[in-house]
Structure formats: structure tokens, C-alpha cells
Image (cartoon, rainbow, N blue to C red):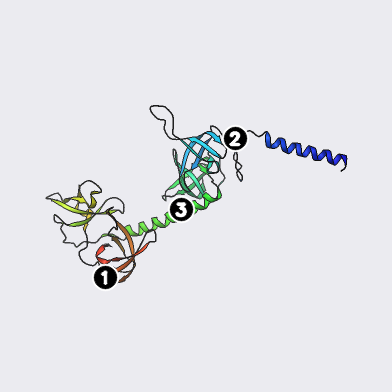
Amino acid sequence: MHRLAWCCLLFALSCDKDATTTTPASASATVAGSSEPLEKGNEIVAALSSVSFREGRVLEIQGDNVVFEYGRPDPGTGKKPQQTVPRARVWRVGQNLEAAPGDALVCRVASGTWLPCKVEARQDGAWSVVDSFGKTHQLKASELVRPDAATVTAIQAYLEREAKHRSFDQAFEAAGKPARAADWRPQKGDAVVVHFVGISWYGATVIEVLGGKDKVRIQYEGKVFPDRDVPLSAIAPQPRTPAEVAAGSFVLVKPKDKSGRWEHAKVVSVDGAHAEVVSRTDEKRKVERTDLVPIVK
């Protein structure tokens, strides 16, 4: 081999060896496909699952893992809780991210709270985003984080699913309330459905009619909640005969378990004494019409 070529080869091998043996082990960390160096003290967002995130501060980098602290200090020790996650699931905050409409990101929607979100537009120097609850926020670029490709895909699917659920819930709410005859008056011992919150209805039994107050005292089925007094407008009778329903109408469906909560669903088809219903999660099942409370205006 030519003397000059031999010298060049030895020099190259020497450089490669130095490069692999002199890199600091824990001062900072960068993963393949990421241009973000990470160091102790950095403010970060860590993924706890594909669509759940936690804000924290880096305490230590241990190879492919990151130890970070989060939340409030313990009153006794003054120390914050700690957690260890893979480095690939950690992203720095405050990086003035460049975004575009349609981007699926992780967004700080409140102090210490990060949610999956979708960018809608840029307005007056801020980014308009919609979170997984359908709420719109105006955020600075430093309040946005772009996760890895797998997490972006998971966020996109999650946001689409949640939007579909909200649409179903809104249609159910717009359809009306559980059916009851205009002259119906509850009696002690009657089985009823009672409005809890939002579009939630639970099974209950009337244990007392409160005279002159237009209220009744109810006991929840399974005693899932304490007894309470509710207005007559918040209850409706459970069915004693097959409900009159049609395909496309909304209904409350008697629960399969002891949770007491009646499921809101949509009728797919009716076949004699049975009906096929579909839930907000696209689960279809066949039920008896005596287990349905129609939702009417």
C-alpha cells in the first residue's frame, strides 16, 4: 500500500476511536430522529401513554431513560414526585414551535396541563387550537410541542374519535328528554330514571314524595350515590311495557351491570319485541324494548 494512503487510513481509524470513547455519558442526551438535546434542569413534557402527558423538570438522564420531577412538593419532605420514562417519550417545552393548520400537537391549555390538540389557524400572533374536549384555546408557539411520529398518529386518531363522540352526545341532547306522559305523577316505590349531570341518567327508586315541594326523594339503584331530593322535572318513569321506538331515534338503555347508569344510544332497527341499538362507541347490541326509554321532545 502506498505510504501516504497507509498514513491516512491509520489517522481515520484513530479519529473514529476517539469519537466513540470521549462522548460524555450523562451530561445531555439526544435520540435518533430528534434534534432536541436534553439536559438536567430542562422543562419538559413526558408522555405517560399515547395521549396522556405530564409537565416536569429533568433531574437526571440515565442512558435511554429520563428521570423528572413534577407536581407539588410533599409538605413533609419538600420534594416533588419523580418519574422515569424513555427518552424518546420526552420533549422540551418553550421551543417556539412552527406549526401549521391541521397539525396534531400537545398543547398547554392551562398551567401544568397538557392535552392533545389540533391547530386550527394562526390569529394575531397566536395559534388557535382545539383540544380533545372540543374547547378552543389561543396559545403562544412556546406552549406547543410536536411529539414523535407515532404519538402524532395516535393523537390524530384520538381527536377524531373524541369529536365523533361529542357529535353523538350533542345529537342525543338535542333529541329531547326521557319520555313521560303529561299526567304522570310519581308514587313511592316507582322505578325511575333520574338526571345526574350533562346527558347522564341513572336508575333510581322513589322513596318519598315531598308534598308541596314538587320534589321527590330518590334512592339510586345499587346505592351508587347517596339518597337525594330532586325536582319532578329531573325524573321519568322506567318502562313497564315495550317502548315505541323507531330506527334513527335516541333512547336510554337499561344498564348491563350494577353501575346504575343508563346508556344513551341510537336505534338501528326494530324487530318485534327487540331493537338493535348502537352506542357512542359504535358498539351494537340487541335489547328488549322493555329495557328502553325513548328520548322525545
| Residue on which the image places disc 2 | 28
Instruction: Indicate the position of residue 297 as horizontal and vertical percent values.
Output: 27, 62
Q: If you read the primary sequence from the N terminus, does the residue marked by circle 2 or circle 1 appear first?
A: 2
Instruction: Indicate the position of residue 54 as horizontal and vertical percent values.
Output: 46, 40
The quadrant holding residue 251 is bottom left
| Residue on which the image places disc 3 | 159
In percent of the image, x 19 and y 57: which residue is there? 191
The CA span between labels 2 and 1 is 67 Å
Amino acid residing under circle 1: Ala
Element marked by disc 1:
loop
Dot in front, 3 or 1: 1
Residue closer to the observer: 265 or 29? 29
* Badge number at residue 212: none
Q: Please identify the quadrant where the N terminus is shown.
A: top right
Instruction: Indicate the position of residue 52 as horizontal and vertical percent values.
Output: 45, 45
| Residue on which the image places disc 1 | 273
Mark 3 neighbour class, 10 Å CA radius: few under 14, some 14 to 19, many 20 or more: many
Compared to 245, does 26 lie above or below? Answer: above
Residue closer to the observer: 218 or 31? 31
Visible residue check, residue 44: yes
Instruction: Indicate the position of residue 197 as horizontal and vertical percent values.
Output: 29, 50
Amino acid residing under circle 3: Leu
User: Furthest residue to the right?
Assistant: 2
Q: Are marks 3 and 1 in contact (CB under 8 Å)?
A: no
Element marked by disc 2:
strand
Left or right placement of residue 44 versus residue 73 in this view: right
